[in-house]
Image (cartoon, rainbow, N blue to C red):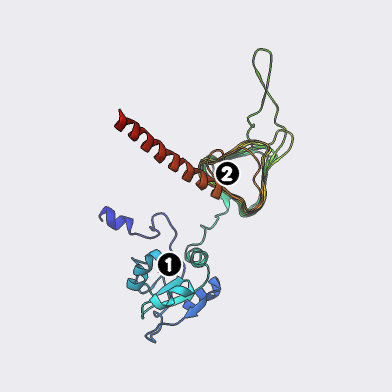
Amino acid sequence: MTLREREAVVADPRFFAKAKGPFSADVLADITQAELVSRKDGGDEPVGGYVGIAPIQAAGIRDVSFLDNRRYLSLLDQTRAGLVIIKSAFVKHVPDHCVALVTPEPYLAWSRVARLFYPYPAVVPGVHATASIAPTAVVASSAQIEAFAVIGDNVEVGAGCFIGSHAVISEGVQLGQGCRIGSHVSISHSLVGERVTILPGSRIGQDGFGFAVGPTSFESVPHLGRVILENDVEIGANSTIDRGSVNDTIIGAGSRIDNLVQIGHNVRLGRCCIVVSQAGISGSTVLEDYVTIAAQAGLVGHIHIGTKARVGAQCGVMSNIEAAQDVIGSPAMPVREFFRNVAVLRKLSKKGSKFAQNNSDVE
């Protein structure tokens, strides 16, 4: 198999459990809450239904695909997919042999179909022989504890949890049911809700970056708070969330933290916030619900970010941001103001170049 052929494989069976199915178009329409549009040629769907998912340019007659970007309409015209998930504006481009599921949110519908074919791997109850579990820990019988995991004193592990190899769950931590903790994760001083996912290498609940200045050196300040991860939070690989100093660090329900994110002590995130890779949030900053922080943005401490505000990539945020405001730049400023400044600088630069050229001609 060539490299190109290997790249074309969807859900390589070496890494992903065999897809469930097949599923009929009616079942997929019900799952996605989309409108089912029959084939233009009057033909029937494949016998037995649809067996898998694939990119629109590589899908076959028994595959499901999707399109939500007008720039790729030419791929829809040429696709061999048996069923496509699209917006209503694209229906006229669907080939005659295709069934269509029409929805305002094709990507959301695609996500639900993909999860139907490829559900999360099932938890296999049991404790590996090399795992270390303290006598005072309470581990649900339906949990799976992998090799060399360490479960400390008075830890509570809820029903259906998965604890990966070499993970360390320190004394007193509570995990709600259905949590998935990746390999080499460490969790301390934390209360974790239900259905929380933490990807490999993350560190949750360690000391925050706090110190007092003494006469000859720094003196570390005790951090006596906790980390609270509410239900349905997902935390990416190698991210760090510090516990609070005297208050708790709180990550609101449904929030998504990307890989390589740093969240400082006493930070509070509301519901369904998004923090993208390599962003850093300094201590005691508050994000209200549905805030988005893009990649490599940096937020100073003790500021307030309003509901549904959006912070652009590489922003330097040094003051409060109002609700629903979009900011970019460093220091961060509203988008329109930023581009006005850019336009002014360009004009000044051109004038400066012309002035320099004129002086050169005179000389």
Location of residue 49 (image quadrant) = bottom left
Tell me the residue at 40%/36% (across/down).
352
Place of residue 31 in the rendered image (x, y in percent of width and height, measured from the top left):
54, 71
Which mark is drawn over residue 67? 1
Q: Mark 1 or mark 2: which comes first in sequence?
A: 1
Q: Amino acid at mark 1?
A: Leu
Q: Is residue 35 above or below residue 242?
A: below
Q: State the residue in front, 101 or 294.
A: 294
Place of residue 78 in the rendered image (x, y in percent of width and height, measured from the top left):
32, 72
Disc 1 is placed on an element classified as: loop
Instruction: Give the left or right position of residue 223, taking residue 359 as reference.
Output: right
Please state, as top left, top right, bottom left or bottom right, where the C terminus lies in the image.
Answer: top left
Q: State the residue in front, 39 or 128.
A: 39
The Cα–Cα distance between marks 1 and 2, rounded to whole angstroms, is 34 Å
Which mark is drawn over residue 333? 2
Please state, as top left, top right, bottom left or bottom right, where the N terminus lies in the image.
Answer: bottom left
Q: Is residue 309 visible?
A: yes
Place of residue 58 in the rendered image (x, y in percent of width and height, measured from the top left):
33, 66
Tell me the residue at 47%/67% (across/down).
20
Q: Please state which of the two labelled residues, at mark 1 or mark 2, is closer to the viewer.
A: 2
Q: State the residue in front, 56 or 281.
A: 281
Q: Is residue 293 visible?
A: no
| Count of labels in the image | 2
Disc 2 is placed on an element classified as: strand
Question: Badge 1 local density, few (<14 within 10 Å), some, or many (20+)?
Answer: many
Check the image and name the residue furthest to the top. 216
Check the image and name the residue furthest to the left. 2
Q: Is residue 69 above or below residue 24?
A: above
Question: Badge 2 local density, few (<14 within 10 Å), some, or many (20+)?
Answer: many
